[in-house]
Image: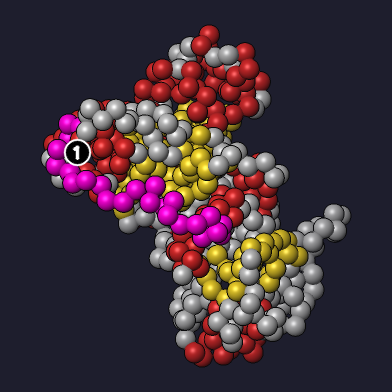
Amino acid sequence: MTDADFEMLMARPEIKSIESDAFPKTVSLDGVVRYDMRVNHYIAGDIVVREGDYGNSAFLILQGELVIARDPGIPADQLGRVKADRQGIGQRIANIWRNSWVPEVRDTDRYGQRTGASGPQSGKRGAFLQDVPAIMREQDTIILKEGTLFGELAALGRVPRSTTIFAEHPAVVMEIRWQGLRDIMKYDREWRRKINELYREAALESYLRQIEILDDVDSEDFSEIAKHCLFETYGTFDWNVTFRRGKPDEPVIAREGDYPDGLLVIRAGFARVSKEYGNGRRTLTYLGAGDMYGLEELYHAWKNPDSGDLSLNCTISALGYVDVIRIPVTVLEEHVFPNMRQPSGSNLTLLDRTVADDALLEWAIDKRYMNGTQSMVIDMDKCVRCDDCVRACSATHGGNPRFRRDGQIFDHWMVANSCMHCKDPVCMIGCPTGAIHRSIETGTVLINDDTCIGCATCANSCPYSNIVMVPIRNKQGVPLIDTAESGQPIVKATKCDLCAGRPGGPACARACPHDALSRVDFRDFHLEAMD
């Protein structure tokens, strides 16, 4: 942030109208503008927001216009993505013959043929569209004009970007990190009102229609319900930083014994459900996107108004970053409970299990493994250390294994150092070229080797150290050097890709002769392990 940019932003009506006196000295408006904002200059073809990215900032157009590619959307290869084509038997056999004895060999000729990658002509955001006129002819587009705020819903809600936005002509855009946006919303009522209204208009009503307990609500009542819902966030967006330092943050969302004033719906992130047990607390379960908390207590209080028993049975706390929608109890009593049966099940029934039954779940949550959808778990009682899994992985990836048969151990289970393809992929936040991305077809988190620039943002962000930076070589096996002056090797990010494109799924699991290795979602795995 230069002094000129700072003065320009402070003079903008959107910033000038903010009540700076409402900010405390520790979080001044000047500080938010100077340290949480920046001014980006885009040229024609620069991608500002990429569909599928997990962004951590919002944008305000200061000069010029931007374009939303609405339909059919920018092709994946132009966004720096990679599509895992299904491989036939012939190609799979050919891959084995092409495996190199030299580690991390690349066909470097491909790097000069990139269309969606960053290059010398690209702007600040690191991705560039080559033929903008053709894209404009082929796309159904929407023009965003000066003064438009966008990207705030994905930034605050930690959800993937829903569309691609790019520059057709030069434009100047203010970018604000989610921390700065949160602080401005906290201390300025007008910004808070504006962003809440944007969310209500753009996404809330459609999201509410997906909640099962609202199935019987009349369609015309959803807009009324949306007006009363509250938006809340807990924890820190960059929770992976404190977690890697061994100091995980877990703020309380609702405490056992508190008065339940509304139904909590998890929109993004994870929360632990626990109950006092002896001199400590016992974990009963965890909640993810779409899960609810407080329904049983609220319904019981409505059904038995004279019982005097109106308090939460458990404590719910944020595991990292959690985005919550709170539906007030008055809304439930008017629109939901009259048409609803007694909720089945209760978190308290989980107390019927022994502490030993839940020890694996407790450990997995403490390690944040509930984030993984495809965690590699090895039964050490069955494993004979033959390394067939590593060799199969190596043979499938050009002679280079993409995981380490090592990791955290609980009892006889080991969670190996292999990409878990997380529900909350913090590794994807901040990648300048979009090289690391989630496959729209399969949900697998992939890295496009052609567009990876070796910045190590993803590797530094991964809470589990499952992404590795490796020095690469050309087809002749010669190590690639950045410049003769620096002498530094060129590196790329690598990790497990679940053998994308190979029929039959991950080769590691198929190669294990003793059925010791499996890829699991921990909620399902915990229940299976109990049996």
Residue 187: x, y in percent? 48, 18
Q: Is residue 232 left or right of 95 when viewed as pictured?
A: left
Start and end of the magenta stretch? 333-360
Quadrant of the image containing the N terminus: top right
Name the residue at 43% across, 39% down: 314
Name the residue at 52% across, 46% down: 282
Residue 266: x, y in percent? 39, 43
Number of residue marks: 1
Q: Is residue 333 left or right of 234 when viewed as pictured?
A: left
What's the residue type where badge 1 is placed?
Val
The answer to whether 92 is drawn above or below residue 288 in the figure is below
**Magenta span has 336?**
yes
The answer to whether 262 is drawn above or below residue 94 in the figure is above
Q: Pick the residue in front: 199 or 247.
A: 247
Q: Pick the residue in front: 386 or 26.
A: 386
Q: Quadrant of residue 226?
A: top left
